[in-house]
Amino acid sequence: MKKFTALFLSSVVALVSAQYPSIPLQFTSQVTINVQSLFPMPEVSGFMSYDYAAQTQRIDSKDPNFGSITTTLDRYDLGNSYTFVQGQSQCDCQPVQGKMPNYQILPGAAYKGQQTVNGVNADTWEYGLIPGANITVYTSGNNLVESQMTVNNMGMEMITTMDFNTFTPGPIPSSTFAVPSFCSGACPTPAPPATPAPNACPGNPPQGCECPSMLSFCSGVNYPVTSTFGADDVDTMAASMINSFSALQPGPTQQCVAQTKAFICATLFPLCTGSIVPVLPCPSLCPTSCGDVSSSNNTCAAALPSNICTNYQD
């Protein structure tokens, strides 16, 4: 009985320790970044400020050779990454790459027990990001201790390790992520997308776009879209939304329903130009005959003025 009780208690402890931690979405920390590869890179240390909710992060790193402090400010909310040396007024700005890192333990991660990492008894989590790329995260409670990414490419291995030495959860002043005034005008302006030819569909969509077949509800979608996969399901969802809207009491006018349908169809099936720049609904599609529902411009915030927009005509 005692043996069974001890086995049961050890199983409970293992189960509790294997529960996914909830990593804070706002934190600061002294960090150390080390890259091991065929061509080793010098270790970099710095101070990291991270705010996932605001879609921004900042790392102030110290040059190991010259001692200068370089700031990398990733503003995912603006789509730009700013780099500048503190004490100087030169700024480099480039489009931010990919999505903002999310340090949460992803569903499906395997719990590998505990290890001593940087003097901390840490829980170990492993999962495959993509084929050839594996992530190992070490946590203490809900705090990050270390994150490690191992990439194997054609027999060459690169291991990138980030140590969180002073992990401190908590809100961060917005001024920390303010873009310096000397960075104004430093960002390249992307070329506006080109309007597809009027005869782009059915047989001449821009590269990377597709022409949908006739939809049952959003039948005015006769222009290129990014993908036709699942288009019928989206069309059914649009029909359900409008049917529910029409059934409201007191019922909206027919003109209001028609305008709302046009706006929803243009939103769910945006025009594809072959560019990564999103194409929003035309301002003219903003419902204007729905009484108090559309009395404020805020109700149609997605319909921004633009040279190129999605114009749905049923």
Image (spheres, rainbow, N blue to C red):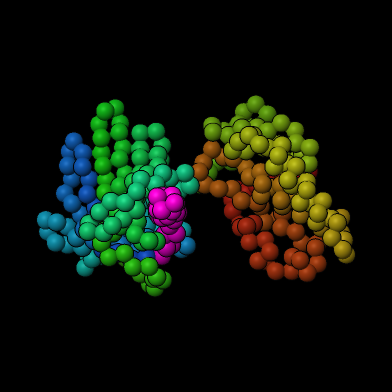
Q: Residue 70: x percent and y percent?
A: 23, 60
In front of the other: 55 or 295: 55
- Residue, x 68% and y 64% (percent of image)? 299
- Residue, x 62% and y 28% (percent of image)? 204
The magenta stretch is 1-26
* 302 versus 125 height, above or below: below
- Residue, x 39% and y 33% (percent of image)? 131
Whether residue 14 is visible here, answered yes or no, is no
Instruction: Give the quarter of the image for residue 298.
Output: bottom right
- Residue, x 43% and y 62% (percent of image)? 25
Farthest left residue in view: 65
In front of the other: 283 or 33: 33
Whether residue 239 is visible here, answered yes or no, is yes
287 sits to left or right of 23: right
Q: Residue 86: x percent and y percent?
A: 23, 66
Is 13 part of what is drawn in magenta? yes
In front of the other: 204 or 62: 62
Q: Residue 11: x percent and y percent?
A: 43, 50
Is 202 part of what is drawn in magenta? no
Instruction: Give the quarter of the image for residue 149.
Output: top left
